[in-house]
Amino acid sequence: MELLSHEMIDEELSGLTKGWETTDYIRINKEFYFNNFKEALNFANEVGYYAEILPHHPEITLSFGQAIVNISTHDLGGLSELDFELARRIDKLNLDKESKEILENIENLKSENDFIRRKAVGRLGKIGDVRAINPLIKALKDKDPFVRRLSAGALGKIGNMKSIYPLAVLLGDNKDDMSSSARDALINIGKPSLPQLLKRTIHKNVLTRRRAVGAIGQIGDEDAIAQLSHCLNDEDDGVRWRAIKYLKISWNAEVVETLRNIVKIDKSNKVREEASITLNKIEGDVRGLLPLFKKGINAISDDIEAKPLNSGGISYYSPERKFLFMAIFRSNPYKVRVELYQGNKRLKNVRTMKGSPEWGVLNFQNKDELNTVLEAAKDSYILIKKSIKQI
């Protein structure tokens, strides 16, 4: 009997049922759920039966309605084929019980007793089997508000694509807090929910728009959040406020200008305050790029000299001549302005300064723009050195 490699362990795990995990490739474990302690104990006894046959003995931790199985080949200090053979037998043992429980709980969703239906929904959510998707979607229309909310939560836990649209439809349901439950479920499902959520940021129902924007922000995908910029002009204060709150995660120059305008003229105090908070965060992000800018300039050449100015800007010399000026102006602290020497050559991505064609201008607000500026700064330094030699 030999230890399995990490690659072999990953391959073996892929052949087991959902829920098996490895701990540092030393052991594998899975949690099994039951209706009560007695069922969990019976399951442990049946696992013990297989363990004696192999023979190979796992560690089993029991609690009410739960059994945690840990398997490892202790003599080898890791995992062997024997561990996965036992896991496969346990899977087969539990599969029949789990299937039976799923079917029983699906049947219980038809009960006239509200409590029985609530309990059934909870169990189906914990089991997390896709066979429960359709019955749970149907339960979203149950007469009992608790069943409806629990069904949304269960669908969020299972995370199947099929449940996204039925949940998204409920974002505008203001009865019994169903809207919040649907939102939370879509957040749990995560990125697959984003297309439906983004569509609903322009929905005619204001509650739907609020929930959609909030869910997108909670999921936290930067590309999706960047698409919330149109919500800054929404007629509803709540939509604008939520969009502003999350756009601090992913923003651009256009968003900054809109936020600056919102701070001045928006009719809602809460929206103006949130815009101010977001702008302060953006200013911090921009200032956080300055050490990277300094490091990048120093990497161009050791002989570059920096001379701080009373205005707050910094001039950079070759060291014989100035070739670059950098500053963050108080009038717009959300970008860094860089002026650099370009002679009679037009540097890539650089705008020529009006009245001073030998100089160009660039701004940066993020790392990508910073890298563009540093490339231009390198070219500018080379040009200034060449011009000095020609004198």
Image (spheres, rainbow, N blue to C red):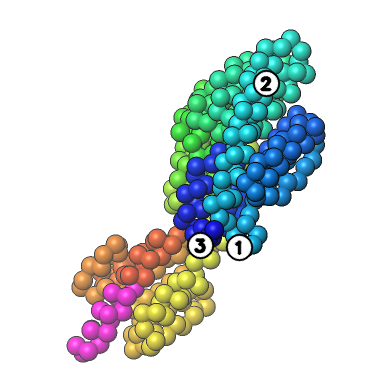
- Mark 1 or 2: in front is 1
The residue lying toward the viewer, choosing from 242 and 194, is: 194
Q: Nearer the viewer, residue 120 or 224?
A: 120
**Could you say whether the residue bearing mark 3 is in a helix, strand or loop?**
helix
Residue matched to label 2: 105
Give amino acid for label 1.
Leu
Q: Quadrant of residue 48?
A: top right
| Distance between the alpha carbons at the discs numbered 1 and 2 | 42 Å
For residue 173, say whether it is visible.
Answer: no
Q: Quadrant of residue 242?
A: top right
Residue tagged 1: 76
Q: Position of residue 321 (x, y in %)?
A: 33, 85
At which x and y percent is residue 335?
A: 46, 60
- In the picture, the quarter occupied by the C terminus is bottom left
Gap between marks 1 and 3, in whole Å? 53 Å
105 left or right, relative to 290: right
Q: Nearer the viewer, mark 1 or mark 3?
A: 1
Please say if 188 is above or below 73: above
Q: What's the CA distance linking mark 2 and mark 3?
A: 54 Å
The image quadrant where one finds the N terminus is: bottom right
Residue occupying image coordinates x 59% and y 39%:
89
Q: Does residue 90 appear left or right of residue 34 in this picture?
A: left
Crowd class of label 1 (few under 14; some 14 to 19; many from 20; radius 10 Å): few
- Mark 1 and mark 2 lie on one chain; the one further toward the N terminus is 1
At 45% across and 64% down in the image, what residue appears?
Answer: 336
- Magenta-tinted stretch: 377-391
In the displayed structure, 316 sits above or below 81; it is below
Tag 3 residue: 286
